[in-house]
Image (cartoon, rainbow, N blue to C red):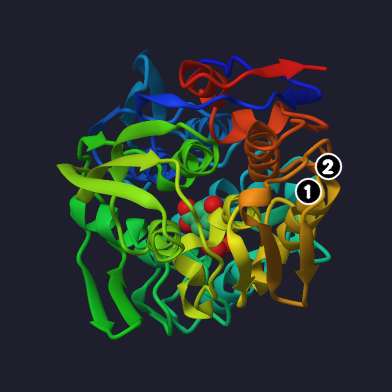
């Protein structure tokens, strides 16, 4: 597998922007990119991937699948060929290192457990502080013999034989759901996951495309997914749609920077991912959404964002799973809105790449925004037409989304703002700097 070329590192200053404009293809979706490596590696045959997000997180998943026996080869920019092992993974000779990626490690834990091989799982400082029991406990109920470091990485898995499980995750998590379903592919008997509130459904959609026999039943906000193991996937081409979560940064920047007009094409249009756009529209955002072609079983859209007068709102707590990664950038938008924005139902934000609830509040407060946190809520008192002074420095805590949110706030503020380290942006959006520069933003090392 080819190595990553890393992007800018260290502190960076966002200068106040005069107006962003331009049209860009959205970067490839991170969730679908991880899954295309994983499912391609598990399948029988050759999976051709186009538009893969070549970020550090995704490439670490590719390396893990190669270490587990798949052929993973880059054939061009964003183009990969994965030669699958038809479910017959091999025990890797070294620990699987997932870097910063919760999705990579949690999904692959399920895959390796289901395949009946052993492995060691490691990650960077941020990933090593994140909870793994949410996955190792239910996998343990299926028969997987994990040992963890007090519920965190490093973790070790002994080769295990799994039986199916019926499970209702106690938290809304697509990673937990996916780990169990992927383990279920290799387990004896039926595996069933019941979600009281649906989370992103890319695993279910892509499993169907890879020929899995899987039943998905919706009941209002709830969803039940059943599959019987063991079963083997069949290779299938994947054309990765654009990432709504990464697209949010340029689109929100356009809404809050005067004289802006930005269009992103190919953005995945999946209701389990687009809660931010619904919320921004409720806040008065001038967003135009036009349908685009289907990609990898997903609808896509072209989104145009123009400078808008936003107003504060209460964001329904039940919308959180459909926009869980977007709260930092929503909070930045809220800082420029007239009135108060209340965001409840955010307990999961404390278990992300950092404690994102605290980190988001701190990045706003550092630039003069009035903000309050509760145990599971964030309240932002927007400045509206008065605008934000800026001048703060975001402490990113190894969190890519805090880094990008801090830079967008700087672009929209009077004095600009800086972040302490932009290195982690390469984990999810390596083209962020090129894209923002193409739209007219000035981001410079300090
Ligand atoms: C993801 C699920 C979400 C999300 C993450 C990607 C996925 O995590 O925050 O960025 O691809 O399944 P949780 O399952 O922990 O909510």
Picture residue at 61% right of the left edge, 28% below the top: 426
User: Can you see residue 232?
Assistant: no
Count the marks.
2
Q: Is residue 396 left or right of residue 207?
A: right
Q: Earlier in the sequence, mark 2 or mark 1?
A: 1
Q: Is residue 322 left or right of residue 374?
A: left
SS at mark 2?
loop
* Residues packed near mark 2 inside 10 Å, few (<14), some (14 to 19) or many (20 plus): many
User: Can you see residue 17?
Assistant: yes
Percent of width and height locating residue 271: 32, 63
SS at mark 1?
helix
Foreground pick, 370 / 218:
370
Q: Mark 2 — residue?
A: 395
Picture residue at 67% right of the left edge, 64% below the top: 349
Foreground pick, 151 / 114:
151
Picture residue at 39% right of the left edge, 26% below the top: 71
- Which mark is on residue 8? none
Q: Mark 1 — residue?
A: 363
Picture residue at 69% right of the left edge, 74% below the top: 377
In which quadrant of the rendered view does residue 251 lie? Answer: top left
Q: Is residue 379 left or right of residue 188?
A: right
**Callouts 2 and 1 close, C-beta under 8 Å:** yes
- Label 2 residue near ligand 1, CB within 8 Å: no
Q: Is residue 111 above or below residue 399?
A: below
Percent of width and height locating residue 328: 63, 53
């Amino acid at each position: 597998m080819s190595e990553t070329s890393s992007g800018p590192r260290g502190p960076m200053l966002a200068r106040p922007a005069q107006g962003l404009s331009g049209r860009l293809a959205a970067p490839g979706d991170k969730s679908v990119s991880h899954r295309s490596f994983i499912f391609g590696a598990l399948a029988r045959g050759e999976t051709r991937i186009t538009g893969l997000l070549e970020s550090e997180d995704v490439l670490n998943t590719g390396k893990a699948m190669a270490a587990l026996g798949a052929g993973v080869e880059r054939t061009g920019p964003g183009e990969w060929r994965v030669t699958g092992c038809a479910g017959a993974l091999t025990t890797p000779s070294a620990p699987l290192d997932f870097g910063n990626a919760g999705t990579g490690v949690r999904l692959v834990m399920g895959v390796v457990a289901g395949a009946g091989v052993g492995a060691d799982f490691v990650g960077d400082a941020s990933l090593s502080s994140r909870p793994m029991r949410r996955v190792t406990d239910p996998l343990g109920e299926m028969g997987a013999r994990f040992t963890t470091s007090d519920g965190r990485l490093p973790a070790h898995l002994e080769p295990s034989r799994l039986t199916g499980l019926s499970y209702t995750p106690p938290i809304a998590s697509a990673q937990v759901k996916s780990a169990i379903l992927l383990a279920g592919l290799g387990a004896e008997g039926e595996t069933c996951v019941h979600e009281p509130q649906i989370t992103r459904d890319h695993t279910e959609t892509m499993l169907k495309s890879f020929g899995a026999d899987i039943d998905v039943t919706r009941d209002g906000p709830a969803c039940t997914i059943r599959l019987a193991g063991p079963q083997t996937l069949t290779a299938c081409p994947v054309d990765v749609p654009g990432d709504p979560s990464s697209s949010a940064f340029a689109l929100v920047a356009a809404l809050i920077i005067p004289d802006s007009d930005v269009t992103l094409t190919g953005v995945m249009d999946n209701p389990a991912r687009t809660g931010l756009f619904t919320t921004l529209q409720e806040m008065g955002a001038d967003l135009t959404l036009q349908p685009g072609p289907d990609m990898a079983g997903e609808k896509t859209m072209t989104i145009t964002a123009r400078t808008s007068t936003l107003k504060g709102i209460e964001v329904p707590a039940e919308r959180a799973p459909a926009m869980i990664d977007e709260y930092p950038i929503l909070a930045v938008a809220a800082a420029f809105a007239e009135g108060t924005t209340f965001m409840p139902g955010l307990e999961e934000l404390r278990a992300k790449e950092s404690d994102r609830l605290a980190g988001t509040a701190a990045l706003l407060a550092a630039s003069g925004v009035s903000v309050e946190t509760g145990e599971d809520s964030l309240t932002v008192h927007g400045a509206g037409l008065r605008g934000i002074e800026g001048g703060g420095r975001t402490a990113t805590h190894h969190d890519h989304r805090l880094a990008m949110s801090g830079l967008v706030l700087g672009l929209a503020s009077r004095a600009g703002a800086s972040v302490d380290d932009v290195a982690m942006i390469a984990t999810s959006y390596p083209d962020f700097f090129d894209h923002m520069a193409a739209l007219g933003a000035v981001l410079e090392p300090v």
